[in-house]
Image (spheres, helix red, strand yellow):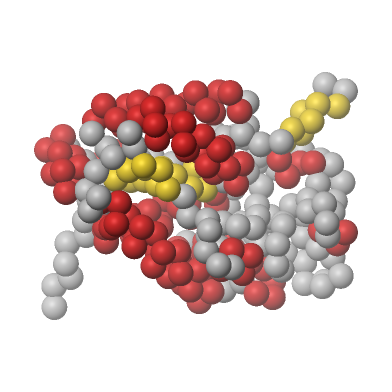
């Protein structure tokens, strides 16, 4: 039996005519908020972009809309010590869990940081362009600090640009089922296992349960991560956001 033709949902691949048809059917833009950032020895450096980019393609195929390229620049906490800059997970890990602490260090591959003011200007200008094209809804999610800045400015941007803004947090148990609610641990590892199992190398992590992997925050991926759990995480988030988007489209 012939398989149904896969929908073209990527902004960068649409012709102007295809763009107009998809926009008219569902004026939704999906923005993956990525980074190039350490997510443990077992995970790809682009994990923050890979997860929402893949998930948003599923959403766009089901609800409609257009998926923007992943943004690989974003804000984060930082420190400057003796002329050396440390960003995000360079600083050490979860402040409340002693076993997840490690020494401050420049973690391999992390190259994404921009100041808050530049990131806010970047998203604001993107929204101005999306408004110009006729989008009415933006779904933006990914890197934690990037997502939190979008949440912080949502009311301002919605009023300024007339675009409803959604993210993917807020389910009943984000600690256990959230979409990108940890860092390189059970949740993110499971979602990448679902979408890109070829990029996850669990063998790179120590099998010593007394040694916590550097730069990972959350439940132990060596024990709890699996593609099956990734499927469940995605299902929970999809059920929630699909309902919200369909309601927004009908308003």
Residue situated in front as seen by the camera: 243 or 140? 243
Position of residue 11 measured from the top left corner of the image (x, y, whole percent) = 28, 40
**Residue 163 % position (x, y):** 34, 37
* Residue at x 77% of width, y 60% of height: 213
Residue 219, visible in the rendered structure: yes
Q: How far from the left and from the top, in percent, is residue 242?
A: 34, 61
- Residue positioned 78% across, 51% down in the render: 93
Q: Position of residue 173 (x, y in %)?
A: 59, 68
Where 229 falls versus 110 (above or below)?
A: below
**Quarter location, residue 223:** bottom right
Q: Residue at the location (78% across, 53% down)?
A: 94
- Which image quarter is the N terminus in? bottom left
Question: In this image, 23 relative to 239: left or right?
Answer: left
Looking at the picture, tell me which residue is in the foreground, 143 or 195: 143
* Figure check: 33 above or below 125: below
Residue occupying the point 60% across, 46% down:
144
Occupied quadrant, residue 16: top left
Asked whether residue 202 is in view, the answer is: no
25 or 18, nearer to the observer: 25
- Marker count (numbered): 0
- Horizontal side of 99 relative to 237 (left or right) equals right
Q: Is residue 239 left or right of residue 101?
A: left
- Of 3 and 23, nearer the camera is 23
Question: What is the quadrant of residue 58 in the picture?
Answer: bottom left
């Amino acid at each position: 039996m012939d398989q149904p033709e896969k929908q073209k949902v990527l902004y960068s691949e649409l012709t102007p005519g295809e763009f107009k048809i998809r926009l008219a059917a569902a004026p939704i833009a999906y923005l993956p908020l990525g980074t190039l950032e350490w997510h443990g020895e077992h995970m790809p450096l682009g994990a923050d972009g890979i997860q929402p980019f893949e998930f948003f393609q599923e959403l766009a195929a089901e609800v409609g809309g257009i998926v923007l390229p992943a943004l690989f620049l974003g804000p984060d906490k930082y420190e400057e010590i003796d002329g050396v800059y440390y960003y995000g997970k360079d600083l050490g890990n979860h402040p409340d869990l002693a076993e997840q602490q490690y020494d401050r260090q420049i973690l391999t591959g992390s190259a994404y940081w921009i100041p808050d003011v530049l990131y806010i200007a970047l998203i604001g200008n993107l929204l101005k362009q999306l408004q110009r094209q006729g989008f009415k809804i933006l779904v933006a999610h990914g890197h934690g600090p990037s997502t939190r800045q979008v949440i912080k400015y949502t009311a301002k941007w919605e009023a300024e640009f007339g675009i409803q803004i959604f993210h993917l947090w807020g389910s009943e148990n984000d600690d256990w089922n959230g979409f990108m609610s940890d860092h390189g641990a059970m949740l993110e590892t499971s979602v990448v296992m679902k979408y890109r199992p070829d990029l996850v190398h669990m063998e790179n992590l120590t099998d010593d349960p007394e040694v916590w992997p550097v730069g990972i925050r959350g439940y132990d991926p060596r024990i709890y991560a699996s593609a099956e759990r990734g499927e469940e995480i995605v299902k929970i988030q999809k059920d929630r956001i699909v309902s919200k988007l369909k309601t927004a489209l009908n308003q």
